[in-house]
């Protein structure tokens, strides 16, 4: 079974420049997303979707692939995750690669747990869901969100 992990890591963050590769506990924060995807054993390909050559080099160093760079359209301030997802799937299809399941893992999620991947994959593969998304309770009044 072919499963794809997509880690979207744009280089142009305005609020926190280079946030996707800033060190967190002595490693680039994106490395945690790459490592947990590898550790899960669920993905035949772990790729970083980026427009930035420095992010690309760090992603490659930690074992992800960067088979193509993001377009300007999917890298601008108004692009949403769906734009990145559609572009990645299209670019893989142009290479005659099709995946059974795809997972987007944010590059700034160093605390993600392995069991969450396993539970999500089980829901997708055994329960026939179209998609699975993490949801959590918000401990404060919603106005503070």
Image: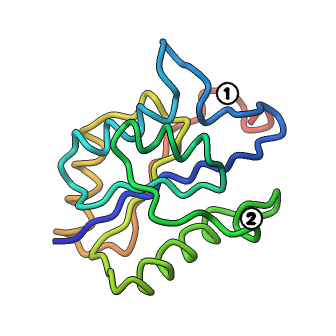
Helix, strand or loop at mark 2:
loop
Q: Which mark is residue 62?
A: none
| Residue 140 tag number | 1
**In the image, farthest residue toward the top:** 25
Coloring basis for residues: rainbow
Q: Position of residue 54 (x, y in %)?
A: 61, 40
Q: Is residue 73 above or below residue 78?
A: below
Q: Secondary structure at mark 1?
A: loop
127 shown above or below 114: below
Callout count = 2
Q: Residue at the location (31% across, 37% down)? A: 36
Q: Quadrant of the C terminus?
A: top right
Q: Residues within 10 Å of mark 2 (few under 14, many from 20)?
A: few
Q: In the figure, residue 37 lies in which quadrant?
A: top left
Q: Who's the residue at 30% across and 76% down the image? A: 99
State whether residue 97 is above or below residue 22: below
From the viewer's side, name the closer residue of 20 and 139.
Answer: 20
Give the residue displayed 31% in from the left and 70% down from the top.
Answer: 101
In the image: residue 9, left or right of residue 33:
right
Residue 104 percent across, percent down from the top left: 46, 57
The answer to which quarter of the image holds residue 125 is: bottom left
Mark 1 closeness class: few <14, some 14–19, many ≥20 residues within 10 Å: few
Residue depicted at 16% across the width and 71% down the height = 1
Lower position in the chain sequence, tag 2 or tag 1:
2
Seen in the image, is 29 located left or right of residue 72? left
Horizontal side of residue 63 vs 67, given as left or right: left
What residue does disc 2 label? 79
Nearest to the observer: residue 3 or residue 69: 69
**Marks 2 and 1: which is nearer the front?**
2
Locate residue 95, reporting x and y percent: 39, 83
């Amino acid at each position: 079974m072919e499963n794809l992990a997509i880690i979207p890591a744009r280089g142009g963050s305005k609020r926190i420049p280079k946030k996707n590769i800033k060190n967190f506990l002595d490693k680039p924060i994106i490395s945690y997303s790459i490592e947990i995807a590898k550790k899960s054993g669920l993905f035949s390909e772990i790729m970083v979707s980026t427009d930035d050559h420095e992010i690309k080099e760090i992603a490659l160093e930690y074992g992800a692939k960067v088979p193509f760079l993001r377009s300007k359209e999917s890298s601008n301030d108004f692009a949403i995750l769906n734009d990145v997802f559609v572009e990645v799937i299209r670019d893989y299809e142009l290479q005659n690669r099709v995946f059974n399941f795809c997972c987007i893992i944010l590059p700034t999620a160093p605390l993600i747990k392995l069991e969450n991947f396993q539970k999500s994959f089980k829901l997708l593969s055994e329960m026939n869901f179209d998609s699975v998304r993490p949801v959590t309770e918000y401990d404060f009044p919603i106005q503070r969100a």
